[in-house]
Amino acid sequence: TPAATHSKVDLLIIGAGPAGLMAANWAVSLGCRSVRVVDKRNTKIFTGQADGLQCRTLEVLHSFGMAQDIVRQSNHMLEVCFWNPVDGTLRRTGRIPDTIPGISRWQQVVLHQGRIERAFLDRIHAQSHGEVQVERAKLPERLDVDTDLVESTHPDVYPVRVQVRQLSEDEATPSQMGKSTPNGLFRSALAPDDTPELLSSSSSSVSGTKAGAVGSRQVIHAKYVIGCDGAHSWTRKQMGIDMAGEQTDYIWGVLDAVPVTDFPDIRMRCAIHSANDGSVMIIPREDGLVRFYIQISSTSDGAADAATKVDRHNITWQRILKAAQTIIKPYRLEISERDLHWWTAYQIGQRVASGFSLHDRVFIAGDACHTHSPKAGQGMNVSMMDTYNLVWKVAKVLQRQSPRSILPTYQAERRRVAQELIAFDHRFSRLFSGKPQAAEDAAREAGVDLAEFRNVFAKGNRFASGTAVEYGPSLLVGRGGDATELGDGTDVVGPGALSRPELSAEGCGESRIVVGQRLNTAQVVCVADARPWQLVDWLPSDGRWRLLLFCGNLVDAAQRPRIEAFARYLETQLLPRYTPARHDVDSVIDCLTISSTPRTACELSDYPAILHPLTTKWHRPGSASAAAGDVGEARAKSQDYWKIFCDDESYHAGHGRAYEKYGIDAQRGAVVVARPDGYVSLLVALDDVDRIDAFFDKCMLPAEMHLPFASRDKPSGAVD
Ligand code: FAD
């Protein structure tokens, strides 16, 4: 065996799909440079696979400053149309909004996965000044964890060792490129896994011992490893973790093409059920493309037997098109081979990993821990949200801002989401079954008849938007607040929204603050410059905790002392406890004030000074000046004018009615603690500082213990 080079890294990411790229992007956004990403392939995805982006994903992308560009390129999906057989012919039987109005500032869009991966790669490059790049054609061969060291938080302890080998161009090229079944599925669970083959050819073609030469090996000593290596996950296998669930017999055909048709709703998302010939889902896409999902066969609902079983390898694009043409009759549908962009036929498994972590040092995320059908447009979204949930926690532990005890919340929070997703996918798949009978059964099972099919669909829409995710109580999520203490109407619903049966299109348009859910946005007006803002624009993904002080009415004689007492608590207790000396006062916990006092009823200077402090990093997130300057010892401190907002009329954008939307009493206010990923940890009264103390006491370490991120290590030539 040739000599291996050794290097150390804080965070090693295996796999550069959506989950891995989100992880790397988040890590570099937090300032972590000691991060490496390895992928066994030499290319990203070019065609096919995922395209739908949920509202919650767009919110997160926006918090990285990435949403506008992605939304500009995307196709916007505004309406879902239902087509059913009526009096012997196909008719439009209903329309609903694709995204339930009011649940988010964003509506679902579709854009090809490859473009989303491109956007991540560009941002990772820009944020890390080129230091962090995907290292392609690198195959992990061995993973060891030193269990004696896993609980150590000493900065020089690297308990995980991963050996990687540089593959040749040939080895790293997916064999399924080009227009053949299972075209483009080289990443999915459907494609045979070539990792064992690559591993067994391990001594092949060593062309040198220099780092980067084909066949050369590196041992990466890592503090933390995240396996984002897709459905066949090598990392998962090293961890000894199983996937529980079932392989279904549903076979679906997918076509991406520019069709010629007289079907009136071809630019709408459509669910079309024919009387006897199955169903088709239409997803209009960017650049004039349309995606058709057609179920070719199902045996898992018991309706078919082995005789009707279809081998997906025998499916051709012409067959999928023919099925679509039959379902859509009497409308015409033509696709020429020239305008066929991509197609495939796939079979789905609905599985969840039994665990998501090993000693809270090695984690898995994305398709590595859950697989299901692609129809509901969930996989890429949920995969990215997994690492969005995980990486800030790892970063906080690396910086010794938080204890390791916060890490188990990753599995607790995300495994539950994965299980809900599988349950949802199971229901959703049946509703889209090609057999009207199965759709009917599924609808009946859900307590409705077929006439109410679209209501079931609408409920699914709420789940599919990603905004219903609710994390249960933990070190990072307090229990709901006390409504009587907080004033009228404050919603303090406990966990369980994912499975709440009453979720429906109606009643979801509010933004009430729910502990454990993400904070929705509301328009507020900046007191200093009268500009209306979406509140979440001031909650970018930069790793800071947010304390949103809904201070109530500053000019109310009874309220003012409460606000002043809270400001004193911030200035003399909470912030000094967690903010290292010489750092900006808002560098760990950022306090934003939202006042119910009209803008012109008081001056900025009437608010306690700690609420609009002198800082160096006061630029608007995402602005050119903010992007140019790192946290600035070098930059002069200046007044932060963008910390105090009011719930008031604006000149050009109306009134946001934020207090009303959030359900907060306009006189007495409330305090919201939001995690760095935007989920609400606490909702308490202004006087309830003990609960804020108790909360941070468990999930944060005092400022004296904090460490800066390690710098990037250069591989050494030491012999193994
Ligand atoms: P992957 O995208 O599979 O990425 C894994 C990465 O790890 C790859 O780069 C791979 O090369 C690398 N890798 C694998 N093994 C190793 C190894 N041993 N060593 C190193 N690297 C390795 N999702 C949606 O949200 N919306 C949709 O509309 C949608 N439509 C879909 C349509 C189809 C037809 C299919 C098949 C999927 C669809 N999905 C959709 C699902 C979505 O594509 C996946 O859920 C998503 O790509 C998962 O991301 P990931 O990063 O976890 O894994």
Image (cartoon, helix red, strand yellow):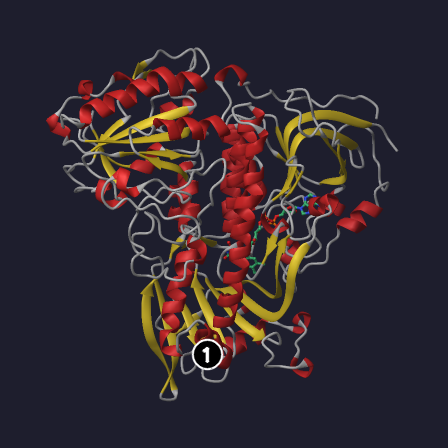
Regarding residue 631, the answer to whether it shows in the image is no
User: Please, what is the three-letter code of the amino acid marked with disc 1?
Assistant: Glu
> x, y (%) of residue 554?
17, 27
Above/below status of 413 relative to 506: above
SS category of the residue bearing label 1? helix
Q: Nearer the viewer, residue 702 or 367?
A: 702
Name the image quarter holding residue 663: top left
Mark 1: C-beta under 8 Å from nearest atom of ligand 1: no
Q: Nearer the viewer, residue 220 or 663?
A: 663
Q: Residue at x 45, y 81 (%)?
A: 274
Q: Residue at x 15, y 38 (%)?
A: 649
In the drawing, does residue 136 fall left or right of residue 23?
right
Find the residue positioned furthest to the left.
601
Regarding residue 229, the answer to whether it shows in the image is yes
Q: Which residue is mark 1?
A: 440
Find the residue positioned furthest to the bottom.
88
Above/below status of 380 relative to 624: below
> x, y (%) of residue 302?
61, 79
Q: Residue at x 37, y 64 (%)?
A: 458
Name the image quarter holding residue 41: top right
> x, y (%) of residue 391?
54, 35
The image quadrant where one finds the N terminus is top right
Q: How many numbered marks are there?
A: 1
> x, y (%) of residue 459?
39, 63
